[in-house]
Image (spheres, rainbow, N blue to C red):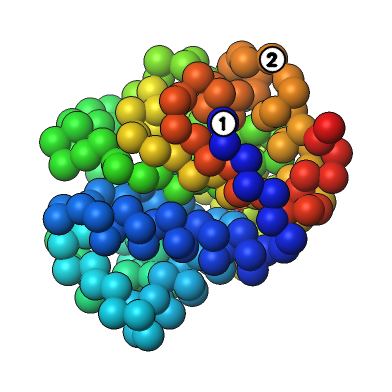
Amino acid sequence: MKILNVANYEEMSSEAARLVEQEIQRRSNPVLGLATGSTPLGLYRELIEGFNSRGISYRNVRTVNLDEYRGLAKNHPNSYYQFMNKNLFHHLDIREENTYIPDGLARPVEAECRRYEALIDEIGPAHLQILGIGTNGHIGFNEPGTPEDSLTHCVSLAESTRKNNARFFDSPEQVPTHAITMGIASILKSDKIVLLASGTRKAQAVKTLLEGTIDTGFPASFLRKHPDVTLIADQEAFHLAK
Ligand code: F6R
């Protein structure tokens, strides 16, 4: 794993944007794997800035998102579909039909998971996958206990994850109990992975990622088996690691 120890959130975001833009500029049909949550918001602001001021076009870019809440329609204000439109896609020249996110309402859910995995294989896998990390070591919504060979599947969200994500909802009860997520094996198919971590809240997770054992108890640990992972973490996120 390559490690970039940066000063703060802004530097983490601009270093990540540099890697994404490099990838876009060196390929004719780039595929990006994207994440939601607070961590990549600064990266997305940088990418929008790159589009507006540095002429980086997304006309030929396709994106696959990691996950979506189960039971939320695309137009629900808390769906990840809306999150991506609001925080990134609507500010770029990307074609809507080139952006892929699991359908949170599709039934049966198993068929949607199979469809999404086949789509990842068909258009991707991602040349570069962006990841955040949960305080419990989840990547995507692969909670502790998820097997290494998991593909896209429906998960029951850990209580700690629902609690962490309650800040985006009007009340904690509104946080969905389930989500569709790429599996660990789906994520590891990507050519390159860039994992972002910022703030003291992520310090224990970064320490466990770098120093703990590789096992299902801490899903992000499987990233250590991938040949091209870059961890970009700021001082606060690194402060417990040796
Ligand atoms: C989001 C995702 C999650 C988040 C993680 C960290 O699509 O897959 O794994 O990356 O929960 O969330 P934040 O960035 O809000 O701390």
Q: Depth check: 108 or 188 in front?
A: 188
Observer-side mark, 2 or 1, equals 1
Where the N terminus falls, by quadrant? top right
- Residue 237 vs residue 161, the one in the foreground: 237
Residue 121, percent from left and from top: 19, 32
**Percent x, y for residue 75?**
33, 67
Nearer-N-terminus badge (2/1): 1
Figure quadrant of the C terminus: top right
Where, by quadrant of the figure, is residue 195 drawn? top right
Q: Residue at x 21, y 59 (%)?
A: 61
Residue 105 appears in the figure: no
Identify the residue at horizontal 24%, vertical 72% (top origin): 57
Q: Which mark is residue 1?
A: 1
Residue at point 39%, 76% (across, down): 50
Secondary structure type for disc 2: loop
Disc 2 crowd rating (10 Å Cα; few below 14, some 14-19, many 20+) is few
Q: Residues within 10 Å of mark 1 (few under 14, many from 20)?
A: some
Residue 81 quadrant: bottom left
> Is 230 placed left or right of 134 in the picture?
left
Please provide percent x and percent y for residue 45.
49, 74
Q: Secondary structure at mark 1?
A: loop
What residue does disc 2 label? 213
The amino acid type found where label 1 is placed reads Met
Q: Position of residue 49 (x, y in %)?
A: 43, 79
